[in-house]
Amino acid sequence: MIIREAKYITSVVDKKNILNDEIVEFAFVGRSNVGKSSIINNLLGNKNLAKTSSNPGHTKTINYFSINDCEFRFVDLPGYGFHKAGKLNQEVWASLIESYLLNSKSLKTVFLLVDCRMAPTELDKLMCKFLVETGINFIVIATKCDKISKAKQILSKKQIAKVLKIREEIIFLHSSVSSQGKQEILEYIENVI
Ligand SMILES: Nc1nc2c(ncn2[C@@H]2O[C@H](COP(=O)(O)OP(=O)(O)OP(=O)(O)O)[C@@H](O)[C@H]2O)c(=O)[nH]1
Ligand SMILES: [Mg+2]
């Protein structure tokens, strides 16, 4: 997949504004701070497209990015599991994420991001179960793999597969710092399209 151009389109806070046209979408979900906005920038080759932050709970809206003149879209979703955000905020975001996942008819694949340095959390398990039960196509991306050795990366994939009860074949390693895994994920997207 060659990224010729990519641009930010819009941010949505209200379920009723979720985009609902024919353009193919790929969405990024995962706990707060796992690296969703960073991977979008890395895959699209533009560091400033999606806003990233070392403070968890940064992305609070559904952010849409159009690629190759509307060939497809990336969707950056709010993170889950950020306790300091307060219960009410967390519920609002969870409900927005759920609405998006259940109502986006052009959603082709969800990228469920988990941190390669730790076992998937209870919320990761719940999200994975939700994707399996709703029949939404998904793969898991183990993020920040520049932070661990190649040997640990192999173990990390095994641990993620075991905890989430999924096949290792649908787990991709990625780093937004070294770009490890970038080409593999872009190829995956090309095949889906
Ligand atoms: N070393 C390393 N750091 C990363 C990587 N990806 C993201 N980070 C860092 O992790 C922090 C969070 O990244 P974001 O991309 O903002 O995370 P997010 O999942 O969008 O977070 P929310 O918007 O809060 O849900 C930032 O400080 C990033 O620089 C990576 O692949 N390697
Ligand atoms: Mg973000």
Image (spheres, grey):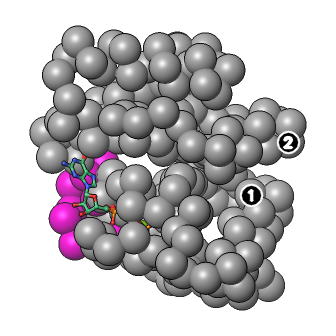
Mark 1 CB in 8 Å range of ligand 1? Answer: no
User: Label 2 amino acid?
Assistant: Thr
Residue positioned 79% across, 44% down in the render: 130
Residue 47 drawn above or below residue 51: above
Q: Give the amino acid type for the residue marked by disc 1 in the picture.
A: Leu
The picture quadrant for ligand 1 comes to bottom left
- Report the number of discs: 2
Say what secondary structure mark 2 lies in: helix
Residue 181 lies left or right of residue 165; in this view the side is left
Image spot of residue 67 (x, y percent): 41, 60
Q: Looking at the image, do the residues carrying marks 1 and 2 touch, with CB atoms under 8 Å apart? A: yes
* Label 1 sits on residue: 101
Measuring 43% from the left and 19% from the top, which residue is drawn there?
157
The answer to which quarter of the image holds residue 100 is bottom right
Task: Give the residue pinned by disc 2.
Answer: 134
Which residue of the protein is positioned furthest toward the right in this rendering? Answer: 133
Identify the residue at horizontal 61%, vertical 25% (top origin).
163
State left or right for residue 131 relative to residue 61: right
CB at disc 2 and ligand 1 closer than 8 Å: no
Q: Which residues are magenta?
A: 40-50
Residue occupying the far left of the picture:
178
Residue 108 can be seen in this image: no
Examine the rendered structure and indicate whether residue 124 appears above or below residue 118.
Answer: below
**What number is the disc on residue 186?**
none
